[in-house]
Image (cartoon, grey):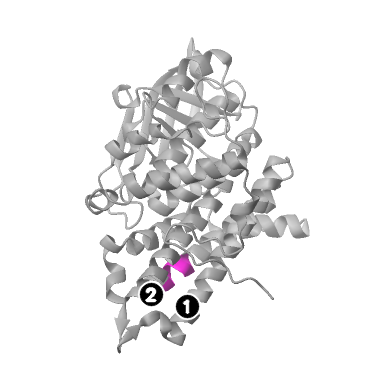
Amino acid sequence: MLNTPAPTTLDAFDFYRLDDQLTDKQRALRNRVRDWVQTVVLPNINPYWEKAEFPRELAMRLLELPIMGGPLATHGCAGLDFIEIGLVTYELAKGDGSIGTFFGVHSGLAMGSIGTFGSEEQKDRWLAPMARLEKIGAFGLTEPEVGSNAVGIKTTARKDGDGYILNGAKRWIGNAEIADLLIIWARDEEGKFGGYVIEDPRNTEGVTMTNIGGKVGKRAVWNADIHLENVRVPIANKLPGVTSFKSLALVLGVGRYGVSWEAAGIAAAAFEFALDYAKKREQFGKPIASFQLIQHKLVEMATEVTLMQNLCMQLGRLLSNFQMSEGMVSMAKYNNARKARYVTQLAREIMDGNGILIENHVARLWTDAEVVYTYEGTNEVNLLIVGRELTGIQAIV
């Protein structure tokens, strides 16, 4: 006889008992982040989201967790394994996508770029203060006319004496307006791809940053349009480990891995809130969870969340063993991003009119899922990357 799964709680849906596969260290970190989200983020995030205000006080409290710098293991960084990185991303996403994005951009993309491509002097200069959140990082790759085709960036870096002169524009750059270190990706006069670190960009001549307003999702993290006009960067601020766009693809691949976990976390939280609501909300004299149509939605959601969780866990194992391909991580992002839209939509439906109120959290998760669907490669592009790996035929262009 099959054992009946243990009843779920609001913060721990795990239908296929993936928790049993975690080490004690992984489980302890996951629980610590989960408790932090429950006590710090969920009770406080909604006013920031509604006002589209960056929650600096909450973001700085990430220092209460041993997670900064992810896999980097020197200069005060956390030295996490890839399953731990995924679990951290998953739990933060269950709380709020804006907090998760702040962390992902600063710790993953910015610190990851410096830790992977920086010289020892650059690591010594920047990583420790970034790990202490004394310096905030941002990552400037996307441009107004260049999104998914990131290899086609138009921002230029011209050698000039003891520095480089940057010209161009960037768009959708998270953390930019609060950043102390802004990594700009550009091509030099020979067309070579490189990363250039602008220190104190808000006070650097030639840098203009404008917050992008009117967002319907991830409203509590700021994204900026950036204009660069003859911005001088010292030679010492060029990341020497970048040899081509393929170098950066390593960092972007790990970022896409994290977004796969993020989408799963958003979906899991939406399901948990909807399940709790369905058990408590009564109509026609009984909980709506007793109606077949509601149970259908709940089973659809639970199934998708379980599949997303399992996909992420296996991808984490592959990455840990250096077996993850570009197609593998694109498949996870493609699947989880579109399923997160579906699951959050069903959660909104189950919670009826209450589902559009941010006080019940699902509305915020619902719109965050829309954002995840587009960034770290649109789902169309991720689909075609998988198709290329399956067939050996390039269909993107």
Q: Which residue is mark 2?
A: 279
- Residue 189 shows in this picture: no
State whether the magenta stretch is mostly helix, strand or loop. helix
Q: Amino acid at mark 1?
A: Lys
Q: Secondary structure under badge 1?
A: helix
Disc 1 vs disc 2: Cβ atoms closer than 8 Å?
A: no
Q: Residue at x 51, y 36 (%)?
A: 108
Image position, residue 314 (x, y; %) = 67, 52
Image position, residue 60 (x, y; %) = 33, 33
Image position, residue 251 (x, y; %) = 58, 37
Alpha carbons under labels 1 and 2: distance apart = 13 Å
265 up-or-down from 150: above or below:
below
Q: Is residue 270 left or right of residue 119?
A: left
Q: Which of the 4 quarters of the picture holds residue 227? A: top left
Q: Which residue is mark 1?
A: 297
Q: Quadrant of the N terminus?
A: bottom right
Q: Residue at x 54, y 31 (%)?
A: 112
- Residue 357 shows in this picture: yes
Q: Residue at x 60, y 35 (%)?
A: 248
Identify the magenta region.
341-346
Q: Crowding at label 1, few (<14), some or many (≥20) Cα neighbours within 10 Å?
A: many
Q: How many marks?
A: 2
In this rendering, which labeled residue sits more in front, label 1 or label 2? 2
Image position, residue 292 (x, y; %) = 46, 86
